[in-house]
Image (cartoon, rainbow, N blue to C red):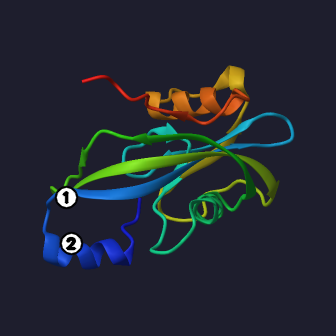
Amino acid sequence: MATPDFIRDLRATAGHQLLYLPGVSAVVFDDEGRVLLGRRADNGRWAIICGIPEPGEQPATAVAREVEEETAVRCVPERLVLVRTVEPVTYPNDDMCQFVDICFRCRAVGGEARVNDDESLDVGWFPLDALPELQDFSLTRIKQALDDGPAWFEPITAE
């Protein structure tokens, strides 16, 4: 994922220390029930589309923007799928981040899926019974997006 300018500005004073940041992810379905995936340039793995909201940007607006920027597909967020803090990530340059992911189920409304920026190596629509190898992050969100229940969140644990 390309590093937004506001994070570069933070890093100028924060160094490599852990930044706790919002993140958005999209499970985008087309009219045939296929899911949109991108093969990430940073690790070569297929995944749902993810990104970081700009300061002041609403999460639903951010997720639609990220999908279009990365895949040229226009989408409409339909419902919240889950909210979850993910494990901290250390990048090759030693920067550390931890994201609170806000995931949306989205419906494609236009555009042709293609690599639209330098964050993806490939982009495509996949039938649910023919998904490429995916990490748990994407699989969990796809599963939750298929369920019409309420948004998922980590339950409170007794201490």
On-image quarter of the N terminus: bottom left
Q: Please give the label number shown on residue 21.
A: none
- Kindly indicate the quadrant of the structure image that contains residue 82: top right
Residue 73 at x, y percent in the picture: 72, 58
Above or below, 28 against 138 in this view is below
Above or below, 150 against 102 in this view is above
Residue 27 at x, y percent in the picture: 64, 42
- Could you tell me if the residues under marks 1 and 2 are in contact, i.e. CB atoms within 8 Å? yes
Q: Residue at x 18, y 78 (%)?
A: 12
Q: Residue at x 50, y 75 (%)?
A: 56
Above or below, 157 against 56 in this view is above
Q: Amino acid at mark 1?
A: Asp
Tell me if 96 is positioned left or right of 21 in this view. left
Front residue (pair 136, 19): 19
Q: Which residue is mark 2?
A: 11
Front residue (pair 110, 75): 75
Tell me if 7 is positioned left or right of 107 in this view. left
Q: Residue at x 19, y 58 (%)?
A: 95
Residue 131 at x, y percent in the picture: 62, 27
**Local secondary structure at mark 1:** loop
Q: Which residue is mark 1?
A: 95
Nearer the N terminus, badge 1 or badge 2? 2
**Local secondary structure at mark 2:** helix
Front residue (pair 47, 53): 53
Residue 63 at x, y percent in the picture: 60, 58
Tell me if 88 is positioned left or right of 54 in this view. left
